[in-house]
Image: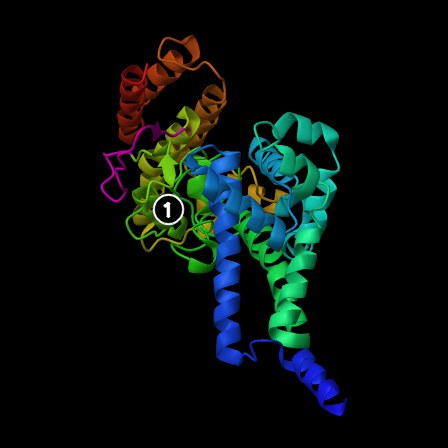
Amino acid sequence: MWTMVALLLDLASNGIVRAGPGTIFVYLLVMTQLTIFTVTLYLHRSQTHRSVDFHPALTHAFRFWSWLTTAMVTREWVAVHRMHHAHSDTEQDPHSPHVLGIGTLLFKGTELYAEACRSKELLTKYGRGTPDDWIERHVYTPHCNCGPTVLAIVDLALFGVGGMAIWAIQMMWIPFWAAGVVNGIGHWWGYRNFETADRSANLIPWAMWVGGEELHNNHHAFPSSAKFSMRRFEFDLGWLVIQMLAGLKLAHVKRVACADRKHPEYHAIKGPQHATLAPRVWAMTEYFRKVMLPAVRDETRRCGATPSPSLSLRLRRALADGGRWLTADDRVHLNAWIDARPCLRTLCEFRTQLAALMEQRDVDVGSDGLSRWAHAAEVSGIGSLQTFAASLLANTIATR
């Protein structure tokens, strides 16, 4: 009898596998990475943005893994993320750090997700096209919490009481990295390749543990692209996995980002269908790069050793969106700096007018507003602005 008790106690303490720290680390690494791939490849790129299709068997494997390790319902996840794209960094965004606070995003991502999912209107409007078969209606949706319960039992059986700590890490992995880091810090800090209408940013050029989701600004610029990396030094692990699956006939890529071949630092991707920049994103990105930044550099050189108020990098970046996201004090500082430089003031006025025009849905070369703007730019006497206006019209004609 005492032998049986000792065996049971040993099993409870060490589990079936009697794993050491190394084995536990490898187990956690594999399990969490599979969960990341399920979120970025299936829930995000395939279900939400329809940029890639997977073999039915692989699709169901993703669905099962999502149920087992996250308790997330496909329709709910898709609806919340589509709403995020539709209303990024506004009061209607279900997870904007600028509305809710960066601390809230980092540590209360699960609560924010659950709160958004309570809206039937959100699910109806943004959750269309997601799985609606028997197993979804009878297992994955009504019994979504059973998956993590099964995983907890598996972890306990494998590793004993220490399995609960392993299970807790698995449960926190997606809320922290996806909801907290990507959706939170990804709209708070980082570098931007494209001037989107939101505050999305690329966190770092590569991050294996989040599967490419760190390239958040690239994704907001090309939401329908299966590939998130754009510049040559950027690496998207999720895209590498998609290419491997496509080689095995388990994935079909529908859209990939088409970089502007005029910029050699960007990849020119060939694919079945190109996902191109929205006209507004292209125009405002090019305006910042080719008009505003050269003017700021010229002003800096012109000042030289003369005492002049300096412009911080943050305020310089704010020239890309007219200081839209600045505090009142910072906006006063930026406006005072611009007002002392007539050429920059003129360029900012042209930027504001162009942004308003590009936000109209039916902007084309024949529209009176865009034609008048281009004509005013051509007679402004500012070389960089004249060159940009000519390229804007040429690009608009070419894409009609």
Q: Nearer the viewer, residue 255 or 164?
A: 164
- Going by the numbered disc 1, the residue's amino acid type is Trp
Q: Is residue 16 above or below residue 372?
A: below
In the picture, the quarter occupied by the C terminus is: top left
Mark 1: give few (<14), some (14-19) or many (20+) Cα within 10 Å: many
- Magenta span includes 276: yes
Name the secondary structure under disc 1.
Answer: helix
- Residue at 36% in and 8% down: 366
Provide the residue span drawn in magenta: 260-277
- Magenta span includes 271: yes
Q: Is residue 90 visible?
A: no
Label the magenta part by its dominant secondary structure. loop
**Which residue matches tag 1?**
239
Q: Position of residue 55 (x, y in %)?
A: 43, 38
Q: Nearer the viewer, residue 309 or 211?
A: 211
Q: Position of residue 341 (x, y in %)?
A: 41, 38
Q: Is residue 374 above or below residue 137?
A: above
Q: Nearer the viewer, residue 38 or 273?
A: 38
Say whether residue 169 is left or right of residue 34. right
Q: Is residue 188 above or below residue 128?
A: below
Q: Nearer the viewer, residue 8 or 118?
A: 8
Q: As drawn, which residue projects farthest toward the front?
A: 1
Q: Is residue 198 visible?
A: yes
Q: Is residue 43 above or below residue 107?
A: above
Q: Position of residue 54 (x, y in %)?
A: 43, 38
- Residue at 38% in and 35% down: 285
Say whether residue 261 is left or right of residue 100. left
Q: Position of residue 35 (x, y in %)?
A: 53, 54
